[in-house]
Amino acid sequence: MFLSVNSKELMMRTVSIIGLLLIANTVAQAADNGVYLGAGVTRSTIDANSSAISQTITNVGIDDDDNGFKVIAGVRPLDWLAVEANYIDFGEVSTSTATTRTAYGLKGVDAFALLLIGPPFLDIYAKGGAIRWQAEGDITSALGTARDKESGFDVAYGAGVQARFGSLAARLEYERFEIDNTDETSALTLAVTWTFL
C-alpha cells in the first residue's frame, strides 16, 4: 500500500519534470511576438545651440524640457529581436529675455532595431537606429518675428524595460538623438503597446 523510498523518489522526479515542462511551455508562450502598435508620453530635453535655430537669427541658446508624445509601430519576429518605427513630437522649448522670446520645436520619424533579453514577462532592451527630424525656431521681439526651419537625418539610440501582460505591454525607455547643432536631445518615454498579429 505504501510506496517504497525509490518509488517516492521516482514519483517526485516525475512530478518535477512535468512541472518544469509546464513552466517551459509558459515561458515559450510569454513572448507575444508579432505586429504591435502603441503610444506614449515623453519628457523631452533639448539643448539647442544658436545654429540649431539659425546663425542669421540669433546667438541665443536654449536648454529646456517639455512634454511630448510618441506613436509606435513595430514587429517582433523573434523573442530577442524587434524592429519599430516611431513618430515623436518632442514638444517646444523656449527662453525669454526682457526684449525677445525664442522658441524651438522639434519632431521626427525614427526607425530602430531592438535587441531584447530578460526573464518571462519582462524585456530589457537596447535599441539603435536613426531619426529624420524637422525643427522650427521662432524669435519674437518688438521688431517682429523671425522664423527658421531645418531638417536632417541623424543617429539615435536608447535602452528600456518593458513588462508584458499577454498582448499588452508597458514600457519605460530613454532615447538619445544625435541631432545636428544640439548638445543634447533626449526623451524619456512611458508607453503602452498592443500586439495583435
Image (cartoon, rainbow, N blue to C red):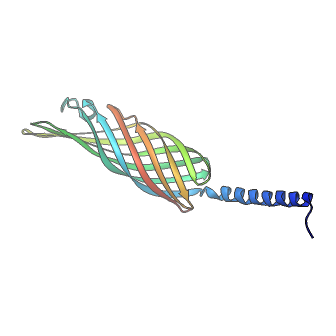
Q: Report x, y in % for residue 187.
A: 38, 43
**Residue drawn at the location 51% of the way across and 47% of the way down:** 161
Left or right: residue 45 compared with residue 82: left
Left or right, residue 104 beside residue 97: right
Which residue is nearer to you in this view: 29 or 177?
29
For image coordinates 31% across by 38% down, the residue present is 46
Question: From the image, which quarter does the N terminus lie in?
Answer: bottom right
Name of the residue lying farthest toward the front: 2
Disc tally is: 0
Residue 82, position as x, y percentages in the image: 56, 48
| Residue 1 vs residue 183, the one in the foreground | 1
Snapshot quadrant of residue 5: bottom right
Position in image of residue 126 (x %, y %): 52, 41
Q: What residue is rendered at 40% in x and 34% in y? A: 178
Work out which quarter of the rendered image holds the C terminus and state it.
Answer: bottom right
Task: Please state the horizontal and vertical placement of residue 132, each as a whole percent of the image.
Answer: 39, 42
182 w.r.t. 11: above or below: above
Q: Residue furthest left?
A: 142
In the image, farthest residue toward the bottom? 1
- Left or right: 39, with 115 as reference point: left
66 and 111: which is toward the camera: 66
